[in-house]
Image (tube, grey):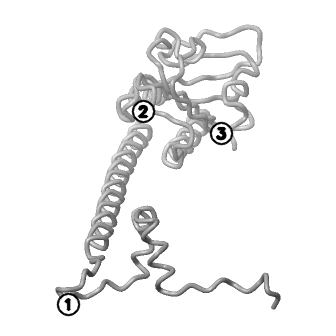
């Protein structure tokens, strides 16, 4: 071992001298308290530094962190259970539809209330210059290529702080400040389609949110479409 590689040696006096020059060391490095044994008060004539206050402060901070983490877990669990219940109710209502028109109206009207959003639209892409008239509230027809443009090729798109598009929400576009667009893979014999969920809350939908539950609803809608229209996968 060379002279340069020999680590410097410190004794107790050196450490105490350094701590005197850096009195805020433990405040900046509270983890160091975990490495120390608190002194016991045996000699009232000697001035002994008591680390008990540091340890109590650390324990209180740890307790506050645990309480806050627990609160967030409980709130998230309640929110997930509430959302799951909403999805289940929407699925049951879709399965109870007595006609195809009733099924579509359940998607575009009843689901808005069940899922606590302000507007739901069903967007169907027609590969034709002639746009047929569909007399169902909430169903909108768009030209070929529009859905790929809207979804950016993704299965689900969540956006916050936006302005709703007339092509998606029609007269309700001005109400929409956040949205989720969910692609429907109905059948190779069916035109591309999406379900759009719009909210007046600009942060109701945000990028990065989980889509498992709403994806389950989308899977049910796809299967119901195939059943009603007698379409193969």
Which percent across, then down, holds residue 3? Answer: 79, 86
Q: Residues within 10 Å of mark 1 (few under 14, many from 20)?
A: few
Residue 222 appears left or right of 128: left
From this viewpoint, which residue is outermost toward the left?
Answer: 44
Q: Residues within 10 Å of mark 2 (few under 14, many from 20)?
A: few
Q: Which residue is mark 2?
A: 98
Mark carried by residue 43: 1
Residue ID at (82%, 88%): 2
Mark 2: secondary structure: loop
Relative height, residue 191 to residue 128 (above, below): below
**How far apart are the two marked residues, 2 and 3, measured between alpha carbons?**
29 Å
C-beta proximity under 8 Å, tags 2 and 1: no
Residue ID at (41%, 26%): 201
Mark 1: secondary structure: loop
Which percent across, then down, holds residue 61? Answer: 32, 63
Residue 120 appears left or right of 225: left
Q: Earlier in the sequence, mark 2 or mark 1?
A: 1
Residue ID at (27%, 66%): 60
**How far apart are the two marked residues, 3 and 1, measured between alpha carbons?**
72 Å
Q: Residues within 10 Å of mark 3 (few under 14, many from 20)?
A: some
Relative height, residue 20 to residue 150 (above, below): below
Residue 104 appears left or right of 181: left
Q: Which residue is mark 3?
A: 155
Q: Earlier in the sequence, mark 2 or mark 3?
A: 2
Mark 3: secondary structure: loop
């Amino acid at each position: 071992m060379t002279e340069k590689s020999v680590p410097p040696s410190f004794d107790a006096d050196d450490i105490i001298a350094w701590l005197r020059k850096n009195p805020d060391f433990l405040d900046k490095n509270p983890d160091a308290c975990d490495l120390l044994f608190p002194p016991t008060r045996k000699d009232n004539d000697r001035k002994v530094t008591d680390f008990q206050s540091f340890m109590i402060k650390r324990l209180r901070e740890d307790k506050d962190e645990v309480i806050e983490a627990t609160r967030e877990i409980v709130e998230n669990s309640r929110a997930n259970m509430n959302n799951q219940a909403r999805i289940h109710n929407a699925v049951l209502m879709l399965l109870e539809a007595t006609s195809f028109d009733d099924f579509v109206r359940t998607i575009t009207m009843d689901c808005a209330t069940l899922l606590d959003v302000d507007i739901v639209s069903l967007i169907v892409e027609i590969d034709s210059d002639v746009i047929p008239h569909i007399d169902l509230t909430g169903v909108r027809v768009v030209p070929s290529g529009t859905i790929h443009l809207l979804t950016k090729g993704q299965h689900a798109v969540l956006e916050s702080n936006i302005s709703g598009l007339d092509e998606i929400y029609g007269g309700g576009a001005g109400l929409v400040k956040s949205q989720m667009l969910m692609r429907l893979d109905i059948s190779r014999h069916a035109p591309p389609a999406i379900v759009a969920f719009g909210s007046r809350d600009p942060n109701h939908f945000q990028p990065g949110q989980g889509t498992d539950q709403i994806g389950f609803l989308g899977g049910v809608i796809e299967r119901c479409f195939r059943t009603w229209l007698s379409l193969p996968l």
